[in-house]
Amino acid sequence: MPLTDAEVKNTKLGSVPRDLADGGGLYVAASRANSFRRKYRFDPKEKLLTVGRYPEVSLSEARERCDAA
């Protein structure tokens, strides 16, 4: 189920790492100052792409950046 802007806005930074998945490898890393990140594989290795931080980058803009990458 895709994330909504309200879910991202209400995510609090905490001592317990918590990731909110959006789909297609995009997720919000609450342990990393609410960063939008995308998981992908290159050859056999898993890689991470940081798209931006919320609220400087909106959820829709993060989705567009992931599609462009």
Image (spheres, grey):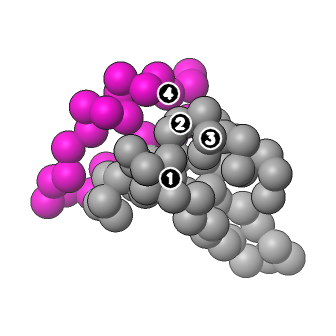
State the CA–CA distance, disc 3 to disc 1: 10 Å
Q: Position of residue 67 (x, y in %)?
A: 79, 46
State the CA–CA distance, disc 3 to disc 4: 13 Å
The answer to whether 48 appears left or right of 67 in the picture is left
Q: Which residue is mark 3?
A: 61
Q: Nearer the viewer, mark 3 or mark 4?
A: 3
Q: Nearer the viewer, mark 3 or mark 1?
A: 3
What segment carries the magenta color? Answer: 1-22
Q: Are marks 2 and 4 in contact (CB under 8 Å)?
A: yes
In the image, residue 29 above or below residue 23: below
Closest to the observer, 46 or 4: 4
Q: Are marks 4 and 1 in contact (CB under 8 Å)?
A: no
Query: Is-magenta flag for residue 61?
Result: no
Q: Quadrant of residue 38?
A: bottom right
Q: Quadrant of residue 24?
A: top right
Q: Amino acid at mark 2?
A: Leu
The answer to whether 19 appears left or right of 25 in the picture is left
In the picture as drawn, the residue positioned furthest to the front comes out as: 56
Q: Which residue is mark 1?
A: 36
Local crowd at mark 3 within 10 Å, few (<14), some, or many (≥20)? few
The answer to whether 43 appears left or right of 4 in the picture is right
The answer to whether 59 appears left or right of 43 in the picture is left
